[in-house]
Structure formats: structure tokens, C-alpha cells
């Protein structure tokens, strides 16, 4: 049976692990089961194996898990401006994982999940650069460390020859999302509030992201890097509309200037505002998974998920 190792328990990992468990044996690592992670563990128990692991200190255990896996999916990440934390999470841990694959299990594939803003603000239409990370202009510690992390795993893959795919997802949404920006949307949707916002974002559902990972596992490329996004930007207002509908509220539509929207964003999300109305190429991802349309059902189910587990989620 095919064996997958998913590093890091969170909303995306829950979708990925749940999806991959239908085609293979999945192990998911976690640091703690506090808060919503307890819910994610509950969702996954019975279909995947959960194991507590610190990738920096539990090297022997990590090595054993990697050697026993056909594909490793690295979903460990962090937001914010703590440069040391970001470097540890986005550079040191990927280096550790890639080095263990290179030394002990070069037939194992690494799927390294990065971010769409890894290159920094380099234009209004962005596609994959011809030479990996060439022309990157990171403007925040987050972007800088994401770029460095990519360079580390890419370089190791090229020298050691193990299969590698680097995925750069845009805004990821899905049933199990409990990230601050979606909790804010839920909070307003509970009151029926639908801000009329002149903002569009590139996004991808966690369902399609999982399909992409499954296909990459089959293809086993060496050094592929691509943006994971739907082909058309989605209006931010649509997320509010769908959640209001899911919660059975009567919509109250309120015009909101972009400047006011920016002020209301969580501090760790504010730096991403410069990517509003930026378009990322979907061509490589579309070649692999086909249709990449907006999945309204995932936003609908997300509202119901948050409602069900409000006691575990900081809303």
C-alpha cells in the first residue's frame, strides 16, 4: 500500500490527509492537540495515524517515518513577523526533512507546500519563473524565509536526485478552515453582514489542492515548482454571501471602502493586502488536475464546521 507522511496538523493538512487516506496509508505529525487541532484529530482518527513529533528534536523518529514513506508532504508553516520563528519553520525544518530524504531515502518524494507570494511583489500577473527563484524580491520576513526554504529543498533535490514538487498555493479555503480571516467572515456572517468590497483574490480549495498533491505523487517530478490556484479570481464578498446563506441569515449588504477593509485585517494578514487583484497563472496546475473552478460548497460547509465547533475555535 502507498504510504504518505504529512508533516504538520492544521486545516490544510486535515483536508490533505483525509483525501489521501482514500488511496493509501497516511501518517500525520503534530506538535500539540490544543484548540482546533483537537477537532482535526477527531476528524482524522480512524482513517489516518497521528503521531506527536518535533521535527527538530525527534530526528530518529522523523528519519524512520521518512524511510517508511513513498511521499512526504511538508505543510509546516507560520505567519507573522518573528524572523527567528519564520526561519526555523520555513528554512531549518525543510532543510532537515530534505537532508534526511537525500541521505536515507532518495526514492521518497517531497511535496513542499510554500506560498504564492514567495517571489514578493513582482507584478500584477505572475507565472512561474524560468529559473527557480530568480528575480525574487521578498518584502517581508515571511516572503524571504519562504523563498529560502524553497531554494534549500530545490538545491538538495537537484544534487541528490530525489523527486520534488514545490507547490505555491494562493488563498486556501475549505470545510475545515479556522484561520483568522475566515473566522472574521464567519463572525460577520452570523449577523447577516455582507460587506460590498471591491476586492478580488486568487484562491484554491483545499479539495483541489489535495487532488494536485495526489497527482504529483503519481507523476513524481524532479524539481517542479508551480502556483496552485483557480484560474479566475473570486470576489471577497462571495465568501460572506455563501456563509450567510449557510447560516440561514438574511443578508445585510454594506459598502466597505478598501482602506477600511485593510484596517480591519488581522496584523499578520495585513502584509498580504498588496496582493489584492494580483493574478497568478493556473496553467501548470490546470494541466495536472483539470478543472479549477470555485467550490462554493466548501465555503458553505466551512460555515457549518465553525458553527459546530465554536467552543474549540477562537471566533
Image: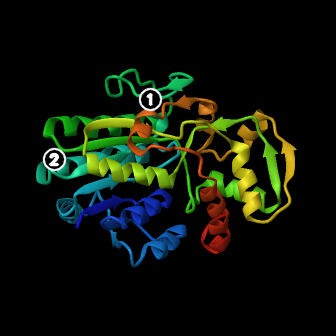
Q: Residue at x 35, y 53 (%)?
A: 214
Q: Secondary structure at mark 1?
A: helix
146 or 24: nearer the viewer: 24
Q: Residues within 10 Å of mark 1 (few under 14, many from 20)?
A: many
Residue lying farthest to the bottom in this orientation? 46
Give x and y (percent) for residue 284.
40, 35
Residue at numbered disc 2: 102
Q: Are marks 2 and 1 in contact (CB under 8 Å)?
A: no
Q: Quadrant of residue 136?
A: top left
The mark that comes first in sequence, 2 or 1, is 2
Vertical comparison of 55 with 50: above or below = above
Q: How many marks?
A: 2
Residue at numbered disc 1: 119
**Placement of the C terminus among the 4 image quadrants:** bottom right
197 or 9: nearer the viewer: 197
The label on residue 278 is none
Q: Residue at x 68, y 69 (%)?
A: 307
In the picture provided, is 205 more to the left or to the right than 146?
Answer: right
Q: Residue at x 27, y 40 (%)?
A: 153
Amino acid at each position: 500500500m502507498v504510504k504518505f507522511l504529512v508533516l504538520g496538523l492544521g486545516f490544510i493538512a486535515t483536508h490533505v490527509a483525509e483525501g489521501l487516506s482514500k488511496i493509501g496509508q497516511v501518517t500525520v505529525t503534530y506538535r500539540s492537540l490544543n484548540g482546533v487541532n483537537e477537532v482535526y484529530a477527531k476528524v482524522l482518527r480512524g482513517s489516518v495515524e497521528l503521531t506527536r513529533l518535533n521535527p527538530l528534536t525527534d530526528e530518529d523518529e522523523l528519519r524512520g517515518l521518512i524511510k517508511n514513506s513513498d511521499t512526504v508532504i511538508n505543510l509546516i508553516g507560520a505567519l507573522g513577523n518573528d524572523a527567528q520563528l519564520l526561519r526555523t519553520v520555513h528554512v531549518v525544518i525543510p532543510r532537515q526533512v530534505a537532508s534526511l530524504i537525500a541521505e536515507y531515502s532518495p526514492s521518497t518524494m517531497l511535496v513542499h507546500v510554500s506560498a504564492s507570494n514567495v517571489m514578493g511583489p513582482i507584478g500584477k500577473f505572475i507565472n512561474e519563473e524560468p529559473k527557480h527563484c530568480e528575480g525574487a524580491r521578498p518584502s517581508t520576513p515571511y516572503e524571504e524565509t519562504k523563498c529560502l526554504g524553497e531554494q534549500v529543498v530545490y538545491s538538495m533535490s537537484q544534487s541528490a536526485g530525489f523527486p520534488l514538487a514545490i507547490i505555491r498555493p494562493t488563498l486556501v479555503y475549505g470545510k475545515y478552515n479556522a484561520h483568522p480571516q475566515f473566522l472574521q467572515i464567519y463572525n460577520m456572517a452570523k449577523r447577516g453582514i455582507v460587506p460590498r468590497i471591491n476586492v478580488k483574490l486568487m484562491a484554491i480549495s483545499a479539495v483541489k489542492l489535495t487532488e494536485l498533491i495526489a497527482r504529483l505523487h503519481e507523476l513524481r517530478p524532479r524539481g517542479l515548482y508551480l502556483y496552485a490556484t483557480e484560474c479566475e479570481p473570486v470576489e471577497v464578498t462571495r465568501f460572506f454571501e455563501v456563509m450567510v446563506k449557510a447560516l440561514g441569515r438574511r443578508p445585510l449588504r454594506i459598502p466597505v471602502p478598501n482602506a477600511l477593509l485593510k484596517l480591519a485585517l488581522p496584523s499578520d494578514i495585513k502584509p498580504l493586502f498588496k496582493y489584492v487583484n494580483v493574478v497568478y497563472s493556473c496553467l501548470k496546475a490546470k494541466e495536472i488536475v483539470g478543472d479549477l473552478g470555485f467550490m462554493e460548497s466548501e465555503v458553505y460547509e466551512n460555515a457549518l464546521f465553525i458553527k459546530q465547533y465554536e467552543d474549540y475555535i477562537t471566533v
